[in-house]
Amino acid sequence: MKKIILILTLMIFIQSCEKDNADIKVHLNENWKQLNIGTDANLTKAFFIDDQTGFVASVPSIDSLKESIKQNLNYMDLLGSPTIIIDTNQYYSYQAKIVLSRNHKPSFFKTTNAGNTWTSISTPFASQITDIFFLDENYGFVTTEYEGIFRTTDGGKVWTKVLASFIFPGNGRVVLNPDYKIRFFNKMEGFVQIKDNSNHYMLIQTQDGGLSWNFISNNADNSKPNFFSHRVRILADNKTGFLISRQGKIYKTTDRGANWNLIRQMNEFSIDASFLNEDMGYYLTTQDILKTGDGGKNWEQIQPQMPNTPDIGPDSQIFGFSTGEIITTNFYYGRIYLSKNGGVNFDLILDKGEKQLNDVCFPTPNTGFALGNRGQIYRYSKK
C-alpha cells in the first residue's frame, strides 16, 4: 500500500513539474513566432524602418582568400585629412580574393509585411554585409566586409558604390578590412565611422548622399573629438545623433553631424544607449542602467533586477520606449528581457540558448525581430 501511495505521489509530482515547465515554455514564447526567410544560412544583421518594413542580411556563401599584411602604424600616419576612395580599380579596399561559391544563395532579404513573406535582393558584391541603414523602403545603404559601401535608391534593384576605402594621410597606405558604421539623417546628410584592423578610427561626413565625403576627425588628432564608437543612434527628428563608446563616452550632435559634443564621460565599460528624443534616454553599462531626462546633463542610476542577474554582457543591447518599457538582450546566452517599469524589474521573454542570437531589432515596443543561426528568425508581437 505504501508503494502505491509513493508511486501515486511521484506521478502527481512529475505531472505538476511537466505542467510548470509547459507554462514556462508558453510564457517564454507566447509572443514569439518563428518566420521563414528562405535560407538556412546564419542571419547576422537586421534593420527595420517600422513594424512592417525591414531588411535582413545573412552570411554569404562565398570563399575568401585573405592575405594578411602586417602594418607598423603610429599616430603620425593618421594626422591630416585622408584620401577618400570612391570607386577605382587602382586601389582595393581589401586584400582578399572574393569568389562566389558554386551553390551561391541570396544573402540579403526584404519584407514589407512584418516578415510574413520575404524577397531576396540581388547585390553586386559578394562579401558579408556588416551594417544596414535605410531611410525608407527604397533609399538606403549597406556596408560590406571587404568591398566598401553601397547605396540604392530603388529598394535594391540598382546599387552604386559610394565609398571603397580611404588612404592614411601620412604614409599613403590603404586601410585594410575596414569596419564601417553608417547613419544618415536624410537622403543627403550622413556620416560614416571607419575603424581599421589596428583600431585606428576616422569619422567622415557627406552632404550629397555619398557622392563626396568630408573628413571630420580621427583618434590621433587631439584638436578634435576622439570618437571610439561602439554604437550609433539616430533619432527620428532627422538632426540628432549619438555615438556611444566602450570607454564610457557619449557624443551628441544636434546639427546632423556637423558638430559633436561630449555629454557623458565616466570610467566605466559602456555597452549601449537608447534615446527616445533629444532629452530622454537610457544608458547601459555592465552593472546598471542610467536614465536621463535633460539630454545627458544629469543621469539617474537604475539597478535592474533580472532573473539571471547579472546578465548584461559586452554584446548586450537596450531599447527604450515612451511607454516606459525597456528591452535588453544578451546575445551570448541568447536571451531577451522586458521591463514594464522603467528598468527596475525584468522578465525573460525569450531564451534561445548560448550563442544562438546574432542580432535583435525592436522598431516599436509591440514588434521586434530576433536573428539566429541556420536561418532562424523570430517575430515578437505583444499580445
Image (cartoon, grey):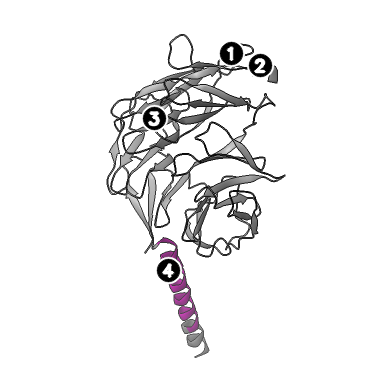
Q: CA distance from mark 4 to mark 1?
A: 59 Å
Q: Secondary structure at mark 4?
A: helix
**Mark 1 and mark 3 residues within 8 Å of each other at the beta carbon:** no
Which residue position is annotated with label 4?
Answer: 22
Q: Amino acid at mark 1?
A: Arg
Indicate whether residue 92 is drawn in magenta: no
**Picture residue at 30% right of the left edge, 35% below the top:** 120
Query: How far across and down, in percent of the image, does residue 45 sit?
Result: 44, 39
Labels 2 and 3: the sequence-earlier one: 3
Q: Amino acid at mark 2?
A: Asp
Q: Give, as a single range, the part of the protein colored magenta.
A: 9-29
Q: Secondary structure at mark 1?
A: loop
Residue 365's place in the image compared with 184, above or below, is: below
Which residue position is annotated with label 1?
Answer: 173
Q: CA distance from mark 2 to mark 1?
A: 9 Å
Any mark on residue 77, and which?
2
**Mark 4 and mark 1 residues within 8 Å of each other at the beta carbon:** no
Query: How far across and down, in percent of the image, does residue 20 sit?
Result: 46, 72
Residue 377's place in the image compared with 61, above or below, is: below
